[in-house]
Amino acid sequence: MKNNNQTVIITGANSGIGKKIALAFGAQKANVVVNYIVDESSADDVVTAIKDLGGNAITYHADVTDLEACQTMVKTAQSTFDSVDVLVNNSGITRDNLIIRMKETDFDQVIDVNLKGAWNMSKSVARVMMKQKRGNIINISSVVGIIGNPGQSNYVASKAGLIGLTKSLSKELGLRGIRVNAIAPGFIQTKMTDALDDDVKAAYLQQIPLNAFGKAEDIAHAALFLASPKASYITGQVLNVNGGMI
Ligand code: NAD
């Protein structure tokens, strides 16, 4: 599974799952654009770690909800590294609440970052990848986008939307040699899930046949596979990485 010299843009790559995906591509000597929106020093640390692993990397500050910023990020990736081979739409936020208590802004913000952000980035790379006649887009969805979850109507709608986006774009871009897939992680240990109460975590664990929470590396391995030639006949799919939850 070699991803040598690929140029990979990863949104929200300074923490959690995105960081591990960035390091995994870095270890394969890829050129990585480490997108971040807050905490520049953590993004700098990811770049340093990638260079130590033998890859190449730059940080890029951009809000994925801003289409123009996404387009400029893609242009910068292309002018720095000559191509854009892989886009990983990883940025995501939660604003959990029951629908009767959820504010309209909580719904709008989550859809804007998680779904519209992925659309903005996909639109920005599509033309470049079409000209190259190759490319890979990987959307980080979620198990809850398939099975639903109480208190997360905004988040679940965004993650289910990402699956629809994946399937549509795979049909639209397949003829141009561009593959589009989603990964649906289960419960992965990151700061997003560390914030949950212990009883909520215990309830999740009971639903996992492998009796363990996932690691960010588990998602990184799935992303490396989907971006590699080993997955060259796979598009429009949702790869479940969830310890058997569904
Ligand atoms: P995280 O909070 O560490 O990562 C999210 C990243 O997105 C952060 O770097 C954050 O700064 C960035 N981000 C937020 N708003 C942004 C914006 N407007 N523009 C650019 N970047 C922005 O959490 P994580 O657990 O690593 O989550 C990564 C992805 O995996 C998310 O899409 C999340 O929904 C998904 N996911 C996580 C789990 C889990 O169990 N942790 C399960 C399923 C799916």
Image (spheres, rainbow, N blue to C red):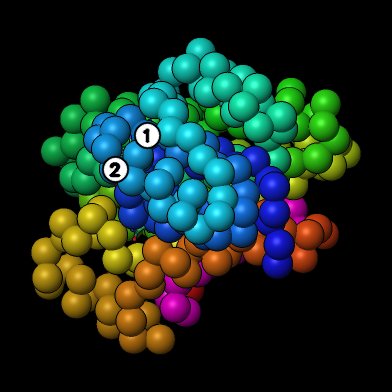
The quadrant where residue 147 appears: bottom left
| Residue 166 visible in the shown view | no
Q: Are marks 1 and 2 in contact (CB under 8 Å)?
A: yes
Per the image, the residue denoted by label 1 is 36
The quadrant where residue 31 appears: top right
The quadrant where residue 64 appears: top left
Q: Note whether 65 is above or below 56 in the view shown.
A: above
- In this view, the residue in front, 2 or 139, is 2
- In this view, the residue in front, 121 or 37, is 37
> In the visual, does 197 lie left or right of 51?
left
Q: Secondary structure at mark 1?
A: strand
| Residue 36 visible in the shown view | yes
| Quadrant that contains the N terminus | bottom right
Circle on res. 42: 2
Tag 1: amino acid: Tyr
Where are the magenta residues, as a range? 234-245
